[in-house]
Image (tube, rainbow, N blue to C red):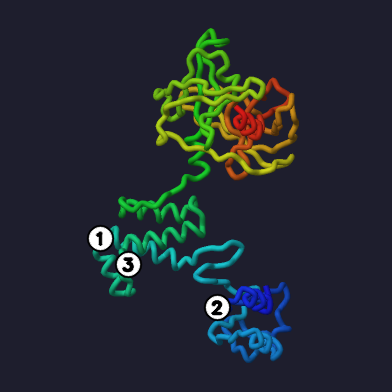
Amino acid sequence: MSGDAHVRICERLGVKLPRATRLTFSSYQPLTLLFEGPPPPAGNFSPDLLKDGLRGAFRSNGFAINPQKVHYADKHSRRTVTGLKINEIVNVDRIFVRNIRAALFVVEKQGAAVAQKTLKDKYGREAALASHLCGRISWVGHIKGPSDPIFRSLASRYNKLFPSEKLEILPTIVEIRERAVWVVEHWGGDATEGSMQGTAFFLKSVGLVTAWHCVDGATEIAVYHPSKPSNKFKVTVAKNDAHRDLAVLAHEIPATEYYEFDISKRTFKAGDNTTALGFPGFGPGDKINVRSGLITSLPIKSAVPMIEVAQKLSQGMSGGPLLDEDGAVAGINYKGGPSEARDFAVHVKALTDWLSVA
């Protein structure tokens, strides 16, 4: 927005522009039109090098140029704004991170009292050490993201040192999928000889989800995480829709035992990347099966929106999640395998639409 526009808006509101307003001019070409001569070297420069007309425009709009705040940057320049590095993405300066690591190291090796004294004597800070470090590490997480490995490393060290003031560390996509997808096993119905297996997963605001055909006719249902196959939890069917082949299971599994996926907010199209998760032919020692592929079609079958995928959805993966590129649930694995010509998942919209009226 131009300075003139800033002034007009402020005049209508009856307020004055702040004294520290920052204006930025940018272009894909050198900004030669801003200067009386050639552009100056990158860095701070004298406002006297600007064209008279531009300086006059500042003055007429109520601005006074601070000589210490006038900078020029070419395409090779390092961009730093309020402690942030601006490259392809916004990032935290490595010196900022290095100082946090150094402070944590002092606490780990010499104790909090020594670090607190250093903070006051060397840097003149009166703040409590825990609050000081918490704020700085939180800033790293705010800029880089709560699942960023650097933030997670700093926060983990901080939490060990200050357990009463812990920072929240969000799990990574890999950690979520490792603990959100479980094996579902049932007896009864068509399973006259032993148990039948499928996949179930935890979904935020919904619960434990699977495919209806994985539990249809069951007299007894259990779920367990593959890392603890002997620790089985009995569950029951809370809601089901045979037409959509969906079921939500009632359970009493402690929340500390699992993570939950988010529901995807994307609008899908053919060619989008997807990841199917599940436990095909699960046996002792097996781990989650991760199959990457693409959406090949978005058909509607008997009024149910579906997602056709390129990867094979083998028997045992039914009821598992189909994830989008963000690791959120795009669909529920439905049908596929070597004997099937096409592989489908029920679109997650079918689940949310059903639950909204169930």
- Mark 1: which amino acid? Gly
Are discs 3 and 1 less than 8 Å apart at CB?
no
Whichever of callouts 3 and 1 sits on the residue coming sooner in the sequence is: 1
Image point (51%, 54%), residue name:
145
In the visual, does 39 lie left or right of 317? right
Residue 167's disc number: none
Q: Residue at x 39, y 63 (%)?
A: 100
Which residue is nearer to you in this view: 322 or 6?
6
Q: Which residue type carries mark 2?
A: Pro
Neighbor class of circle 1 (other Cα within 10 Å; few <14, some 14-19, many 20+) is few
Camera-nearest label, 3 or 1: 3
Residue identifier under label 2: 18
Mark 3: amino acid: Ala
Residue that numbered label 3 is attached to: 127
Which residue occupies 32% across, 67% down? Answer: 127
Marks 3 and 1, how far apart in space? 17 Å
